[in-house]
């Protein structure tokens, strides 16, 4: 419906046409209009926005991993809180880095995201703040 409204005032000869298959990639074939409906080039890195569900999962996962490791070390293994805190933070950081290395070499996108690591660091920092309260 929106496309109909968009093209309603455009003469038929000015409307975009389908690309002609000539061996060139579809992404490189000019079709006129917006590029919003073209598939990304196969070698293009995936979109990695700063804000989104993926980053929220990284923050939350790192926060929960830091807090749960801290709990296990203090309540179950009888460590001092000050001794357990660096181990808890390092554990969450190691898991975050390992996940990004996995994404790079074995994941479906083959993409290492430094933004995901920043989100992991935010989650770890929040966990440290909660422990120190």
Image (cartoon, grey):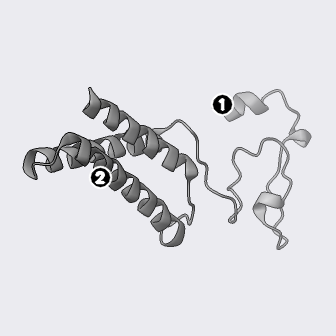
**Which of label 2 and label 1 is nearer to you?**
2
Q: Is 86 situated above or below 41? A: above
Question: How many marks overall?
Answer: 2
User: Residue 53: where, in percent of width, then height?
Assistant: 44, 40
Which label sits on residue 72?
Answer: none
Of pointers 2 and 1, the one earlier in the residue sequence: 1
User: Residue 126: where, in percent of width, then height?
Assistant: 36, 34
Q: Quadrant of the C terminus?
A: top left
The residue at 88%/34% (across/down) is 11
User: Residue 3: where, in percent of width, then height?
Assistant: 69, 35
Which label sits on residue 87?
Answer: 2
Q: Is 131 situated above or below 25? A: above
The residue at 85%/31% (across/down) is 10
Q: Quadrant of the N terminus?
A: top right
Q: CA distance from mark 2 to mark 1?
A: 54 Å
Residue with the mark numbered 1: 2
Q: Helix, strand or loop at disc 2?
A: helix
- Tell me if mark 2 has few (under 14), some (14-19) or many (20+) residues whose alpha carbon lies within 10 angstroms of its own: some
Q: Quadrant of residue 58?
A: top left
Left or right of 97? Residue 61 is: left
Left or right of 70? Residue 114 is: right
Q: Helix, strand or loop at disc 1?
A: helix
């Amino acid at each position: 419906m929106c496309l109909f409204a968009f093209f309603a005032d455009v003469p038929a000869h000015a409307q975009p046409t389908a690309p002609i298959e000539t061996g060139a990639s579809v992404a490189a074939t000019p079709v006129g209009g917006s590029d919003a409906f073209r598939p990304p080039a196969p070698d293009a890195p995936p979109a990695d926005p700063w804000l989104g569900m993926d980053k929220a999962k990284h923050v939350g996962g790192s926060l929960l991993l830091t807090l749960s490791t801290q709990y296990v070390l203090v309540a179950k293994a009888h460590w001092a809180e000050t001794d357990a805190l660096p181990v808890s933070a390092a554990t969450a950081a190691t898991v975050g880095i390992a996940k990004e290395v996995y994404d790079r070499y074995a994941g479906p996108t083959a993409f290492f995201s430094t933004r995901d690591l920043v989100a992991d660091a935010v989650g770890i920092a929040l966990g440290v703040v909660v422990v120190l309260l």
